[in-house]
Structures are given as C-alpha cells and as structure tokens.
Amino acid sequence: MRRKQPKIATDPVAFEAFYRRHVDAVTRFLARRVDDPHTVADLVAEVFIAVLDSAHTYRADLGTEIAWLYGVARNTISAERRRVYRQHQLSDRMNGRRQLAADDVARLEERIDAERDARKAFAAMEELPEGERAMLELVAIDQLTVTEAAHALGIRQGAAKVRLHRARRTLRNLSFVMDGAR
C-alpha cells in the first residue's frame, strides 16, 4: 500500500504554513555551518525546494518535522560543498550570486554572528570521523534527541547512540591532550 503524499507537496497553503513554521530553525541550522549571508539565503531556498521534491519521504512515525528538515538541510549543504569544490577546481572565483537587499544581508549577518560560537564548536569537532561529528552536531548543537538525529542521518537509534558516545569520548580525550600540552 502506497503512503499518502503529505499536504505540503500539493497544497500551497499547507506548504506556506510549513515554511513559516520552520524557516527560522532552518536558517539558524545553516547559519551555524555557513558564514556567508548570500550562501545561507540560497541554501534556505534550496532546502525548501528539496522539501517539495522529497515530501513523500517524510514519515511522522520516524521523527519530527524538524529532524527530517535537518536531514534535508545536511544533504543540501553537502551538495553545495561538492558543487563549490567542483567550481573551485574550474575557477578561482565564484560568480553569479543573486543580489540580496541590504536589509537581507544585515539580517543574515546578524544571524551568522549569533551562530559564531557554534561554528567554533564545529571547528573543534573537525578531528572526528564524519558519522560521529554529524551525530554530535545534531544532538549537542542543533538540540535534536538521539532518536531525531538518527532519523535525520538515516541510521538506527542504537548506531546513533554508539556514534554519540564515541564522539564525546574522542572530544574528552582531545581536550585532555590539549590541556596537558599547555
């Protein structure tokens, strides 16, 4: 039996309500990971376009809307990073950014400044393997539950708990080594 497609995929009013309900959380999520207001604005738009395309994959029984959205946002950031990497291979300079109004830039710069500490935390986690780092980001920084983070990453809850434990242990060990070096 096929699952019924969520209303946000077919009903513009439902999508607008969904967008308004979650746009700030998605923007904060992206601003914690990206420090350019133009890129944050573009990624927010791409996340919600991806939501329309993948609305049929959302299953309320597996997690909250925000956990699902964070999964979509992570995929969008990954795709953007791959795109930028390919573009940098071809060119030293990115062109073609859409123009933002001064108010939009100022608002995004404020949001990016507000997420500065989170970006510092991400830098501290760079030594972790990708899976452990992703799990720690979603739980410690984005405030998802372990179950929600597992859903966002597409893994089982048991695997999520193991990744989180390993990430925390590794960070404690790194902290000990760094403190001992002083």
Image (cartoon, rainbow, N blue to C red):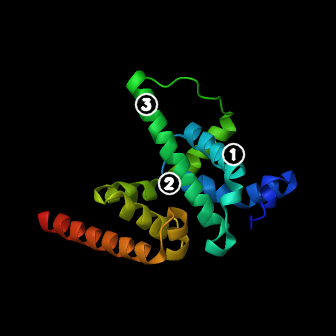
Res 145 visible: no
- Please report whichever mark, 1 or 2, sits nearer to the chain's N-terminal start: 2
Mark 3 highlights which residue?
Answer: 86
Q: What element carries label 1?
A: helix
Q: In this view, does 32 lie to the left or right of 175?
A: right
- Which residue is the site of mark 1? 49
Does 131 sit left or right of 181 as displayed? right
The residue at the far front in this view is: 1
Look at label 2 and name its amino acid. Arg
Determine the residue positioned at 53% across, 23% down: 95
Q: What residue type is labelled 1?
A: Ile
Mark 1 and mark 2 residues within 8 Å of each other at the beta carbon? no
Residue 79: x and y in percent read 51, 43
| Rendered image quadrant of residue 101 | top right
Q: What element carries label 2?
A: loop
Q: Which residue is drawn at 78% across and 53% down?
A: 9
Q: Position of residue 179 (x, y in %)?
A: 18, 67
Q: Which of the two labelled residues, at mark 3 and mark 2, occupies the earlier sequence position?
A: 2
